[in-house]
Image: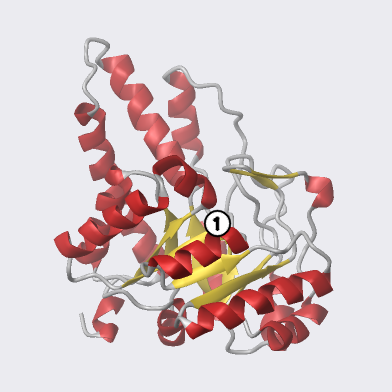
Amino acid sequence: MRLSGTTLFKQCYGRYALPAVNVFFMEEVLGLFAAAQKANAPFIVQTTPFARDYAHPEMLLAMIDAAEKIYPDTVFAVHVDHGIEEHIWDAINSGGYTSVMIDASHEDFETNVRRTRSVVEKAHKANISVEAELGVLAGVEDNLRIDKSRSFYTDPKDVELFVKETGCDSLAIAVGTSHGAYKFSGGQGLQFHILEEIQHGIPGFPLVLHGASHVNEEVVQRINQAGGKLKTGAKGVQDEELKRAIPLGVCKVNIATDTRLLWTMIHREFFRDHPEEFAPTGPGKIFMQAYEEFILKKFELTGATGKGSEFGI
């Protein structure tokens, strides 16, 4: 069942969060939908502009459409992550998306409001929900690169006016997360005092955590033992932090880095241990199983397991 983000958020607010997972290729799509049906958990499947350039928007939507038929007992939204107007107009016209994000967070406040409001007006006419962003996250994800010196936390004093002026349906906030595999090098973690102030300013309004992957140190070590050269010591969002953030209004938790690290670990280890192999199906089968298990754990962590029944599944 394909729903808007707004419909999902109304049900989950303050009780559980929805894993919002970026996908690039078939194995990820199948693993995600298989896990969701097994867990009876609602979720959000996301495509970034980078993924749309890599696989083509029609190919991505075709894979999602096929997965919906293969796993009919699923509840989900289809979302454009970190889009600009070009991606959003295409998504609206495609008919397959139920949610979009306009990322004008790098603009000044007035420009962010103007661009977001323009997207909201067009998206709402198509019954598509809109996520906006206020505050800037540091880090690297796809073709998005933001130096730490240019990042800043969301100012709680701005959120009420921003939501009122734009009409957006959810708000991505900067409260200590970062994009990519090199997170929290300073060990600061989530800034709960800021999150609490934001919720106080816009009570009941759905909040979004970008850069919310965990970055498992064991996975990074296994990648490096199999020939990788990733930096160590990164720290993502810890499980207890995520659990604490959900009652404070966080309804959507973006996941991308962890699944990339999982893909890298499995493929490096497979070809290290089986140097005579060259078929993509070998590591592909292992990855799909590991991916499904990973997503099942995320559903448990966010409290989404079993909540698909609330939507008639």
Q: Is residue 240 visible?
A: no
- Identify the coloring: secondary structure
> For this rendering, which residue is in front, 240 or 35?
35
Q: Amino acid at mark 1?
A: Ala
Q: Nearer the viewer, residue 222 or 139?
A: 139
Where on the picture, by quarter, is residue 189?
bottom right
**Image position of 169 with respect to 265: above or below:** below
Task: Determine whether, in the image, residue 110 is placed left or right of residue 225.
Answer: right
Q: Residue furthest top?
A: 276
Residue at left offset 24%, top offset 27%: 280
Quadrant of the snapshot with the N terminus:
bottom left
Q: Which residue is mark 1?
A: 212
Q: Specify the quadrant that holds the C terminus.
A: bottom left
Q: Residue at x 41, y 19 (%)?
A: 226
Q: Position of residue 135 (x, y in %)?
A: 75, 65
Residue 96 pos. (x, y %): 36, 67
Using residue 182 as the reference point, say whether residue 220 is left or right of it.
left
Vertical position of residue 180 compared to residue 44: above or below: above
- The residue tagged with tag 1: helix, strand or loop? loop
Residue at figure coordinates x 33%, y 49% from the top left: 59
Q: Is residue 200 left or right of residue 257?
A: right
x and y, in percent, of residue 242 in the image? 53, 65
Number of residues whose C-alpha sits closer than 10 Å to that of mark 1, classed few (under 14), some (14–19) or many (20 or more): many
